[in-house]
Amino acid sequence: MRKTTPTALPSTNLACSRRGFLKLSGISAVGMGSMMFLAGCGPAAQETDDAGSTADDTAATASFGSDGMLRVGMEAAYAPYNWQVSEESEFTMPIENVSGAYADGYDVQVAKLIAEEFDLDPVAVKLDFSGLIDALNSGQIDIICAGMSVDPERAESADFSNSYIDDDIVMITTEDSPYVNATTFADIAGATVLGQAATMYDTVIDQIPDVTHATPAETVPLVIENLANGRCDIITYSMLSVPKLIEQYPNFVELQMEEKFEGSAMPDNAAIVKGSDAEIMDRINAVIDGISEDERQDMWNACMDRQPA
């Protein structure tokens, strides 16, 4: 599933990331387009052979990196997970279908490691999020690395790897807050809690009894600004982005909660064609599992530092 992740702090003048959750009405958050909880469109109905597999599936599986290239589907417009730049660097890969452009971001770094495992040259293919699974099953791309989470609907149309980054929602307060030592929801009774509009960062607040659910702010920088200016007691925030937040705001503190939000975990998984050779997925998972938690956080922080304004 997709989610909004802070891409920067207010002092850096960056807008919030495009990773958002659906509004309760089913509309996506803050310019996220039509992507959020929506599963990528599945492939069109196809005739199957007696073994139950489609010819397209077989062709796509057989073509995984067959020309020496690993074609990686992504938006290239979704920092810090993936974004487009005009200059090549050690962190980038070319975007095959955009002349003179390159992709950078967390997804790109993981895809480069996977390509290295298979001795393939990685290239990004820039696509709308909603069309990624169709592109995978048609053979246009070999793998999806695009901030996509496995869910039951998507799992019917593609095979998903282990997660290569896991985010969650945490709560932030200030060091002088009366709630700074809270560990349970009961400990923050009476607090004013703020999240970002039209995202799960706002809707999870309803899981906390006896708090004032503040009118949500439209962007992550505005959420942060409200806490910094004392207009709320607590904000909800991306777990992965906390280190950079506290680096910028040393008086902010993450609540060390023993009680957690339900349904707020946000893994990101790579996807390959449904029914692919098990060895392909085993090798992808070996690469992913070999990235330590510290390495993941360091990669994430570095991407947040590099991402465009």
Image (tube, rainbow, N blue to C red):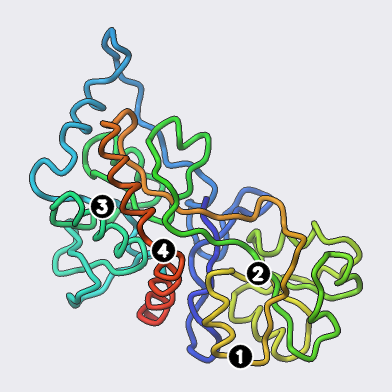
Q: Earlier in the sequence, mark 2 or mark 1?
A: 2
Check contact, mark 3 vs mark 4: CB within 8 A: no
- Up the image or down, 161 lies above or below 293; here it is above
Visible in this render: residue 117?
A: yes
Amino acid type, callout 1 = Tyr
For discs 4 and 2, the disc positioned in front in the rendered view:
4
Q: Quadrant of residue 97?
A: bottom left
Residue 196 badge: 2
Pinpoint residue 99: horizontal percent, then vertical percent: 14, 64
For discs 3 and 4, the disc positioned in front in the rendered view:
4
Question: Residue 273 versus residue 76: which sits nearer the camera?
Answer: 273
Residue wearing tag 1: 249
Residue 292 badge: 4
Q: Label 3 vs label 4: CA separation? A: 22 Å
Check contact, mark 2 vs mark 3: CB within 8 A: no
SS class, disc 3: strand
Packing grade of label 3 (10 A; few <14, some 14-19, many >=20) is: many
Pinpoint residue 128: horizontal percent, then vertical percent: 36, 52
Q: Earlier in the sequence, mark 4 or mark 1?
A: 1
Q: Residue at the spot x=54%, y=80% of the render? A: 243
Q: Residue at the spot x=38%, y=75% of the render? A: 303
- Up the image or down, 93 lies above or below 176; here it is above
Q: Residue at the spot x=17%, y=64% of the render? A: 94
Amino acid type, callout 3 = Val
Amino acid type, callout 4 = Ser
Q: Residue at the spot x=15%, y=44% of the render? A: 65
Q: Label 4 vs label 2: CA separation? A: 30 Å
Packing grade of label 1 (10 A; few <14, some 14-19, many >=20) is: some
